[in-house]
Image (cartoon, grey):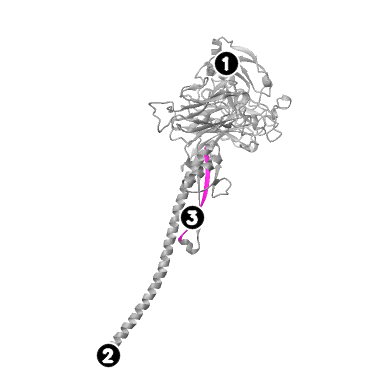
Amino acid sequence: MIQKDSFRKREQTTGKVQNDNEAGQSIVIIAFALIGILAFVGIAVDVGLVYARSTQLQSAVDSAALAGVVELVNDSEVNANRKAEQFFNANGFNLTVTTGGNSLATGRALPPSALGALQYELSADWPVELYFLKLIGRDAITLTRRAVAGVFPQADIYASRRIEDGVLSTSNQAVFGLNSCTHMGDPFSPVNSPWAPGVYTYNYRILIPPDYPQDIVRVELFDPDSINRPGSAFTVQRTQLAVDNGLPLFADLTCPTTNNYHMQYQPCLIPTGERNLGLPLDVINPFWFVRIDENRRARTGVNSGCGGPPGNNYTASLNTRTTYELFYYAQNEDRTVRRIPLAVYTGQVGDGARDNGDHLTDMQWVSPGGQLSLGQPAPVPTDCGSPNGGDYHATNCPGGTPIGPGKGFEISISQSLGSIMTDPATGNRFIYLNVTAIDGSSENGFEVWAGPNTYVNDINSDANMRNLQVLNSRGAHSSNGVTVFGMGRLPMNSNVNFRVDVPLIWVGPEMAGQSIFISLFDSDSGALPPIHFYFDSIAFNPTTGTGDWGVTYSGTEGGRCRIGLCEDQWTSPPYEIVVPGDIENCDYNNPTPSCIPFYGGRLVANYIGGNSDTYGWQVRSSGLPYLIE
């Protein structure tokens, strides 16, 4: 019994020792397991923190970029960065936004997109302090997030006040050559421009409405060359309305001698006397067009030396060549877009070296590669290699450059515009026109009209005869709703020295309460304030400056230059027009002076224009920003 009890005691003691040993091993294992679990928990917590901070930072960068890009409408990268900085602070980020990369946040304006959207890029770094990962030597991690925001300025500027019927009147387009000076009136084309160094292209787009009744859109260029014919005495024909009001049908008149307008190097518009009848401007023909180009010598300094040619003698070698390029955007199945070229034409200079002027486009409306209009003196071919060569296209191209089939500047919607982008809200389609001065130092005046090709056998290509035909028979020449717009910027030449209405842009009712920013460049040559801005849908009398709604700038408000004294200057800050109406609080059934209902309309500028004043418009509206990436 004693032995058995002793055995049992030894057995119990041995088991206890074994259990104690196993218990000690378990504590060690549990301790190591806890360390591992805590490490995983720590990693999970820190990773979750980093993810949360990353989402927070991306949201802040997105909102700041959206806020900043709107300021580019006013052409201010500085204001864009300041606005982005304000949004960072509002979201709890103490970040200073710079363009030089010396801070944790950098912002910059990107070049406009292919479709004309302004773009703003914003990048931000944010150090995030870690907690558990400090145990393994990682104190913080720097997050970097980026966003690109865009906004369409929605500023399609009417290319002409008579864009529907194609009558030349109070103004036309005009660009200067690369070797010119910006103080001649073109802020961008001279290669030394401080606002756009290098070769610059003006962008136009041609709207084709969904109810356009034709298949062909014929794009016509008026006087695409920079050639000036000689002479100062011409037989002028007046409109039938002028004859009915007592003026003779024909008159022998001469170019004005003021500023040497009777000489070949200068433009010449002969006053017909019809304006003295006191009839509305749009029913008379105030000018007989003889020359619209300006022959000018090249600069001798960065922005100096430009002026009349040596001895005021017309010098064709100084003339400016301009290219006119048509294209459109097609939409791919993945909703991306691709640019499709249509046709290219280069205007002539007639100097015997670059070309001999054999297209005879001076003072003519022509459609390169397309059918000849009534009275057109010569075929006008598209350039070698023009994708949509046309009935008339260049021959003997160097290297046998192939010419594609087509009708040049006569575009078939069904055959040439496959997969063209269509605005889903309006059904509008757009053809684009790029206008680029490629050499020379002179001014090239031109104009653009687009519409059906049904008038080629009835309406004259000569600008003066066309004016008479259209004015004598209202509705004889119509674009059928096709409209030419300058995209944000418009290079202009004013032909008048009297008060005139200039339609700028169409503004829809959705713009109520938003701002439109308008700048003029190099307004001089006799232009005078005040300048009135009003909508043609709201009663306003620009003669008296009174009505239900209008905005008047009398001179130098805000420190800007006064119209007429703005040589080589922008009216800066821009004129700001706040569209009337308040879509949230305005009772349209009970209008008050502080709340004018706005249903849409054309924004019109009214002021006294300068005589042969080359200047530029820039118009932008606030629009709605969107994220690109």
Q: Residues within 10 Å of mark 3 (few under 14, many from 20)?
A: some
Q: Could you tell me which quadrant the N terminus lies in?
A: bottom left
Whether 506 is drawn above or below 12: the answer is above
Q: Quote the CA–CA distance across marks 2 and 3.
A: 74 Å
Q: Secondary structure at mark 1?
A: helix
Name the one closer to the observer, 385 or 608. Answer: 608
Q: Secondary structure at mark 3?
A: strand
Identify the image quadrant of residue 426. Answer: top left
Q: Residue at x 33, y 80 (%)?
A: 16
Hey, what amino acid is under mark 2? Ile
Q: Which residue is mark 3?
A: 128
Label 2 with label 3: CB-CB less than 8 Å: no
Identify the image quadrant of residue 221. Answer: top right
Whichever of callouts 2 and 1 sits on the residue coming sooner in the sequence is 2
Q: Give the image location of residue 294, x and y in percent.
A: 66, 26
Hey, what amino acid is under mark 1? Arg
Q: Residues within 10 Å of mark 1 (few under 14, many from 20)?
A: some
Magenta region, residue range:
115-131
Name the one closer to the observer, 284 or 184. Answer: 184
Q: Give the image location of residue 553, x and y in percent.
A: 54, 27
Q: Which residue is mark 2?
A: 2
Q: Is residue 127 magenta?
A: yes
Q: Is residue 492 left or right of residue 127?
A: right
Q: Quote the CA–CA distance across marks 2 and 1.
A: 144 Å
Residue 337 seen in this snapshot = no
Q: Secondary structure at mark 2?
A: helix
- Tell me the number on the disc at residue 539: none
Identify the image quadrant of residue 111. Answer: top right
Q: Quote the CA–CA distance across marks 3 and 1.
A: 73 Å
Count the marks.
Answer: 3
- Tell me the number on the disc at residue 275: 1
Whichever of callouts 2 and 3 sits on the residue coming sooner in the sequence is 2
